[in-house]
Image: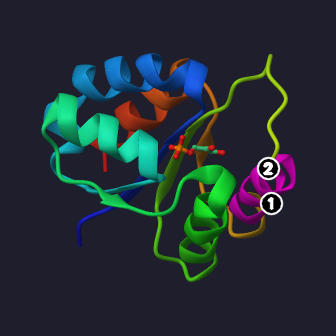
Amino acid sequence: MKKTVALIAHDRKKEEMLQFVLTHKEQLSQYNLIATATTGRIIKENAGLPVTTYLSGPLGGDQQIGSRIACQEVDIVVFLRDPLTAQPHEPDITALLRICDVHNIPVATNTATANLVLQSLLCD
Ligand SMILES: O=C(CO)COP(=O)(O)O
């Protein structure tokens, strides 16, 4: 069955997310991609990959993706957080990371880890 990968990036990490997606475009095209609204739109427009989008993070998108994680419908999360900027929806961000740990879902919060996680999927 196709794996589902969630892609989420804060504003100052969106360019890095796009470069990550473009670097791994061929591999990522094999998976179901889901994303928060703005991250997903940028990926669709600039990488041309199909992405199922949810609400923007501050409007509840992190919680929507968290709910899919809780339902065991997500295999990997790449969440490029901005560690230098306070976010109004910090509780939602913490909740998303927590639900990944509750369900033992790999969550990469930087591209160094995300690269390793994608590499490991190639060996599956
Ligand atoms: O805020 C986010 C994650 O916490 C991301 O939301 P957007 O992709 O809509 O910017």
- Gap between marks 2 and 1, in whole Å? 10 Å
Q: Picture coordinates of residue 39 (x, y %)?
A: 43, 40
Q: Amino acid at mark 1?
A: Ala
Q: Which mark lies nearer to you, 2 or 1?
A: 2
Instruction: Name the quarter where the N terminus is drawn.
Output: bottom left
Q: Which residues are magenta?
A: 89-100
Q: Residue furthest bottom?
A: 71
Q: Picture coordinates of residue 6 (x, y %)?
A: 45, 53
Q: Is residue 82 above or below residue 73?
A: above
Q: Amino acid at mark 2?
A: His
Local crowd at mark 1 within 10 Å, few (<14), some, or many (≥20)? some
Q: Are marks 2 and 1 in contact (CB under 8 Å)?
A: no
Q: Residue at x 38, y 36 (%)?
A: 118
Cβ at disc 2 under 8 Å from ligand 1: yes
Q: Chief secondary structure of the magenta span?
A: helix
Q: Is residue 91 above or below residue 79?
A: below
Is residue 90 on the magenta stretch? Answer: yes
Q: Quadrant of residue 81?
A: top right
Q: Residue at x 32, y 43 (%)?
A: 41
Give whichever of discs 2 and 1 has the lower sequence position: 2
Q: Nearer the viewer, residue 71 or 65?
A: 65
**Secondary element at tag 1:** helix
Q: Residue at x 82, y 43 (%)?
A: 88
Q: Picture coordinates of residue 45 (x, y %)?
A: 19, 36
Q: Picture coordinates of residue 42 (x, y %)?
A: 32, 35
- Is residue 20 shown left or right of residue 67? left
Residue wearing tag 2: 89
Residue wearing tag 1: 95
Q: Residue at x 65, y 64 (%)?
A: 60
Q: Nearer the viewer, residue 70 or 61?
A: 61
